[in-house]
Image (cartoon, helix red, strand yellow):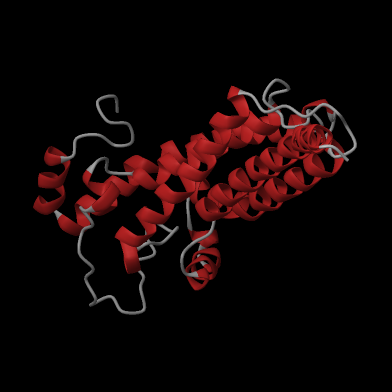
Amino acid sequence: MSLSMRVQDLGTGAAVYLPVLAKSATVLGVGWGLFVTLSPPNPAMLGLDLARKKDERWTERLLLGITPLVKSLSWLTGAIELHMSFYSSNWRVNPYTLTAFALGVGGGLWRRACYKALGKRFIFNIDGRRHSEHPAERLPLVKVGPYSVVRHPAYISAVVTWSAFALVFLNSEGSVGGSIAKMKTLHPILVLLSALLPLPLIARIPREETSLNDEFGKEWMDYTVRVPWKMVPWVW
């Protein structure tokens, strides 16, 4: 076989496999970002929160109840998309998928930075610290890392990673294979979840800030002056 034919074969192979690798990387990157965002750093904390779920408001119950469902649906969606698109020539890598990959991975890394900054202070349940088994233990107010930029940076990762999910799976132009966007049952469910997900996050911010103000008083007020933005710098 001549050198030119070998080069041609390599080019043909690259044209076939590179889209597959890019597609797989996008799906796995977005899935990883969502998994990190929806998984507490200490699984025992989630169990403690679920045990208190009946005593919480609708925002807490919705978030705690929907988290396992969203995680399962995200991985199921990724598996379906990859499986179905392997049998289709409709493989697309475009600005939508590239943006989704960046948002998914970036959102997951941002969430991990929030976990690291919070340490033992992280808990899904807003009042969980108040009912701690060690009430005398007073953990400090976190003001470093992402919390030096906005007051609720962890919520940003939830919105960002779910936006990545919507870009890559729910939009027919951005879908890595277009399979999910054409499914008449799963697609509407995922669209509805995408629309509803930010609502309980935004709704719980005032209550969380009230709880922190009750706990830290002047220190919290000084912090809100130094970091005036809740989620988006210079906007809100």
Q: Is residue 117 above or below residue 95?
A: below
Where residue 131 sits: x, y (%)? 36, 70
Question: Measured along the vertical axis of the image, is residue 100 above or below residue 220?
Answer: above
Give the x, y percent position of residue 56: 48, 55
Residue at 79 percent of width and 42 percent of height: 82
Quadrant in the picture for residue 157: top left
Q: Position of residue 165 (x, y in %)?
A: 62, 37
Quick one: which residue is furthest to the top in this view?
Answer: 173
* Res. 97 in view: yes
Q: Quadrant of the N terminus?
A: top right
Q: Is 59 left or right of 170, judged from the image as shown?
A: left
Query: What residue is rendered at 70% in x and 44% in y?
Result: 24
Q: How many marks?
A: 0
The answer to which of 7 and 83 lies nearer the viewer is 7
- Residue 210 showing in the rendered view: no
Q: Tell me what residue is drawn at x 84 percent, y 34 percent.
A: 5
Residue drawn at point x = 38 percent, y = 59 percent: 115
Q: Residue furthest front?
A: 2
> Residue 55's x, y, as percent?
49, 60
- Closer to the camera, 104 or 89? 89
Residue 202 lies left or right of residue 221; in this view the side is: right
Q: Looking at the rendering, in which quadrant would you find the C terminus? A: top left
Task: Give the vertical position of 142 relative to 156 (above or below).
Answer: below
Q: Can you tell which quarter of the image residue 132 is in? A: bottom left
